[in-house]
Amino acid sequence: MTPDSAGVVCSRAGCRDDAHWRVVWRNPRIHSADRRKIWAACDAHVAYLRDYLAARDFPVEVEPLAAADAAVEATS
Ligand SMILES: [Zn+2]
């Protein structure tokens, strides 16, 4: 198992697929207006994560993941 330095892994718990999407969101109840949380998502989980946040009325945007973007956080 050689880590792929260029790869970003999906933030979904238990998923180790390469992420192709960036899910940008915040919780208006605990985050200030300029705060952003970023999750990474693979093709299989981007809709799941977006819907998970949207169902809670959190502002959420999905963007293509930039190759250099490694500033992602794990869910859980
Ligand atoms: Zn995934």
Image (cartoon, rainbow, N blue to C red):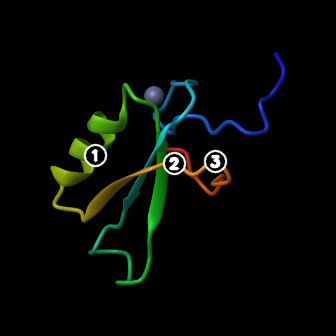
Q: Looking at the rendering, which quadrant does residue 21 occupy?
A: top left
Amino acid type shown at disc 3: Ala
Percent from the top left, x then y, of residue 6? 73, 39
Q: Residues within 10 Å of mark 1 (few under 14, many from 20)?
A: many
In this rendering, would 7 be left or right of 54? Answer: right
x then y, percent, for residue 42: 46, 31
Nearer to us: label 1 or label 2: 2
The residue beneath circle 2 is 65
Label 1 amino acid?
A: Arg
The x, y position of residue 53, in whole percent, is 26, 51
Q: Nearer the viewer, residue 4 or 16?
A: 4
Disc 2 element? loop
Circles 3 and 2 in contact, beta carbons < 8 Å:
yes
- Work out whether 53 lies above or below 1: below
Q: Which mark is residue 50?
A: 1
Per the image, label 1 sits on a secondary structure element best described as helix
Circle 2 Cα neighbour tier, 10 Å, few/some/many (<14 / 14–19 / ≥20)? some
Q: Is mark 1 within 8 Å of ligand 1?
A: no
In the image, what residue occupies the spot 51% across and 25% down? 15
Check disc 3 and report the residue beneath it.
67
Marks 1 and 3, the one that precedes in the sequence:
1
Q: Give the residue at x 31% y 67%.
A: 27
- Quadrant of the frame with the N terminus: top right
> Mark 2: which amino acid?
Leu
* Residue 38 visible to the viewer: yes
Q: Quadrant of residue 29?
A: bottom left
Q: CA distance from mark 1 to mark 2?
A: 14 Å
Measured as percent of width and height from the top left, residue 26 is found at: 35, 67
Q: Under tag 3, what secondary structure?
A: loop
